[in-house]
Amino acid sequence: MDLKTIIDEFDRVAKKQELSTSKYHQLIVMIEDEIKQALADLQSTDDIDHKSVIKHLAEKLDAYRVQEQIKMLKKDLKVDLENYPEILGEFVETDISKASRNVEFESPIVNKIILNLLYHEGLFDVANTFTDEAQQRHINWLRRDFSKMHEILDALKAKNLEPALNWVSVNRLILDPKESNNLEFNLRRLQFLKLSKETPSEGINFVKTYLSPLASNHRNELLNLTLFFFWPEKVETSPYSDLISPEKWAAVSQEFIVQFCGSIGVSFRNPLTVTVDAGALGLPTLLNTANLMGRDEWAARRKFPVAMELGKEFQFHSAFVCPVCKEQSDEDNPAMMLGMDECHHVLCSQTISALTKRKTRFHTIQCPYCSCVMSVNMCQRLYL
């Protein structure tokens, strides 16, 4: 794909649109000026000929040929806007509906997923409207918890660290010890930097009281904070200027979101966002496969005929690919461990069926890796 060609063409169309908008604006300003001048003339004296002023204004407006100019601008822009999809279609598939399939969704489940997104993003007013229009009940516990999360996030945006620190203190027992230690240290560090800027004399006592107990996992960071005292008036130009950067506040907010979501048993990435991101990554592969297979065969498929490599961030459970047939296991073709006391190699169910020897009364299989022979009845299904 020649991305440069696509980008250049897009920039050309965008510039053409900006030029058209500018010309529209100039035309409107000129007409507005003529009308203002005519009004000023009409209000200047009592003995002015109103008809002649209006006639003169009409002649000037006719001279601008407003309708012709607008029609010409629209025509030029329309040609470029219609040509761009054709140029884009030479490099990418513009009809993504080819990769779609008719899938029946359960409306209550989809509604809950949407509500999850709205709560997660703090759009509680939108959630209220959605529940009314979709006749869907609120998920009260989730709404309550995410409401609390956004209260704390709003406080962090206002540089108020107390709500977040109180939350860590109250929930310390249900949080991961190491992660909660990191979060508390990062919050206390921001608190120290804020305090040192306002009342430097209290900085040393703050380090001893709040940061030293957390120092076991943060010795280097604590050392940087102590060196911070040598630059009381020139922090922005010091080697430690990154400590007061806005990114630190954004990072601690994101760290808090991860810890908070983990404490209530939900993912810090809401399901709808994950689904859309995964679909966008897999769309090129799906389009290519759908084009090769044809719509009818594609629609009849129960599972993807090709591997979908989306990255580790989209892997939420273990997956097994049979080393013999290279197929990924699923409900119809589960992973099976060979024997209970034998080699314990793992194959998929279809491979075991293909390798099973049926010449004897007891069906047996010989492991393709270590040559162990065992009864098929001794193979055990693995639940991943």
Image: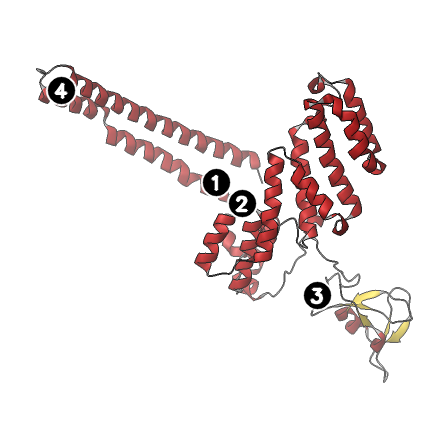
- Specify the amino acid type for callout 4: Val
Marks 3 and 2, the one that precedes in the sequence = 2
Residue, disc 3 = 330
Q: For the residues labelled 3 and 2, say whether their Cβ atoms are less than 8 Å apart.
A: no
Marks 1 and 2, the one that precedes in the sequence = 1
Residue, disc 1 = 87
Mark 2 or 4, closer to the camera: 4
Q: Which mark is residue 92?
A: 2
Q: For the residues labelled 2 and 4, say whether their Cβ atoms are less than 8 Å apart.
A: no
Mark 4 or 1, closer to the camera: 4
Please indicate whether residue 349 sits to the left or right of residue 296 in the image.
right
Give the Cα distance between marks 4 and 1. Answer: 51 Å
Give the Cα distance between marks 2 and 4. Answer: 58 Å
Residue, disc 4 = 53
Secondary structure at numbered mark 4: helix
Q: How crowded is mark 1: few (under 14 residues within 10 Å), some or many (20 or more)?
A: some
Mark 3 or 1, closer to the camera: 3
Tell me residue 11's x, y (percent). Answer: 48, 31
